[in-house]
Image: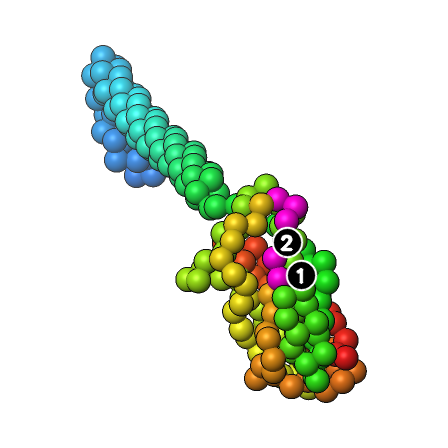
């Protein structure tokens, strides 16, 4: 039975529409569109399972990355804690191994350009009376003497000499005298200001400013 012209046109348009839809479908859906219902359901199930497996693999990869980052963070924290502990321990040991210094002060000092400084034992260019204020005894020997540093702040001239004290042990509260009998190689002008610094063998020190007479 032949269709009239209008029906032929409608059928051709319908066929063209279906072919256009089929052309625009994705490759896998285009195949599915032509298969039987049961086969289509199997294909859809296979594709959905494939997508699920991809998602699971992605989640596993993310979990592994996060786990590695956590392990790195824990390791860094542990190293930091150990480092801080070791540094603190070394600092404590170093502090405890440093010997305490003697505590001294100057009771009296004199500096003269004319040898006018008269000490309990001699007269000369200078003398310094030093007192031991600490609990440590100060041992003065021929090979281990306190040092005296004289600096004329007016002229900018310095002079260093040993204490010239006889061997002795200076206990807490006792004094010793450093001096330069006669004329030393230090000639400040009268009226100058001289800084007198005394350093005992263990590093304890004291100083005072004196006007030259």
x and y percent of residue 212 in the render? Answer: 75, 79
Which x, y percent locates residue 176?
61, 57
- Mark 2 lies on a secondary structure that is strand
> 60 or 36: nearer the eye?
60
| Relative image position of residue 44 (x, y in whole percent) | 28, 20
Are dots 2 and 1 in contact, CB under 8 Å?
yes
Q: Residue furthest top?
A: 38
Residue nearer the viewer, 2 or 89 = 89
Residue 164 vs residue 26: left or right? right
Q: Is residue 176 magenta?
A: yes
The structure residue drawn at horizontal position 67% and vertical position 64%, both measured from the top left corner, is 120
* Residue carrying label 2: 175
Q: Work out whether residue 45 can be spotted.
A: yes
Residue 167 or residue 59, whichever sits in front = 167
| Relative vertical location of residue 108 with respect to residue 170 in this rendering, above or below | below
Q: Is residue 193 above or below residue 21?
A: below
Task: Identify the residue shown where x is 23% and y is 29%.
Answer: 31
Residue 80 visible in rendering: no
Q: Colour scheme of this structure image?
A: rainbow
- Crowd tier of the residue under label 1, counting other residues whose Cα lies within 10 Å: few below 14, some 14–19, many 20 or above: some
Report whether 187 appears left or right of 62: right
Location of residue 19 (image quadrant): top left
Which residue is disc 1 drawn over?
A: 129
* Residue drawn at point x = 34 percent, y = 38 percent: 24
Q: Which residue range is magenta in the image?
A: 172-177
């Amino acid at each position: 039975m032949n269709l009239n012209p209008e029906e032929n046109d409608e059928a051709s348009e319908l066929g063209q529409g279906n072919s256009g839809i089929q052309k625009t479908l994705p490759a896998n859906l285009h195949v599915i569109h032509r298969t039987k219902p049961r086969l289509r359901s199997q294909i859809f199930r296979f594709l959905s399972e494939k997508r699920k497996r991809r998602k699971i693999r992605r989640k596993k990869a993310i979990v592994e990355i996060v786990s590695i980052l956590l392990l790195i963070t824990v390791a860094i924290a542990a190293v930091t804690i150990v480092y801080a502990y070791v540094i603190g321990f070394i600092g404590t040991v170093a502090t405890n191994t440093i010997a305490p210094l003697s505590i001294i002060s100057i009771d009296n000092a004199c500096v003269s350009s004319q040898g006018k400084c008269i000490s309990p034992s001699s007269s000369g260019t200078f003398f310094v009376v030093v007192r031991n204020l600490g609990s440590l005894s100060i041992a003065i020997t021929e090979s281990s003497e306190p040092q005296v540093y004289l600096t004329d702040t007016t002229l900018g001239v310095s002079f260093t000499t040993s204490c010239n004290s006889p061997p002795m042990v200076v206990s807490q509260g006792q004094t010793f005298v450093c001096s330069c009998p006669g004329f030393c190689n230090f000639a400040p002008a009268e009226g100058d200001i001289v800084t007198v610094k005394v350093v005992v063998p263990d590093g304890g020190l004291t100083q005072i400013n004196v006007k030259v007479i």
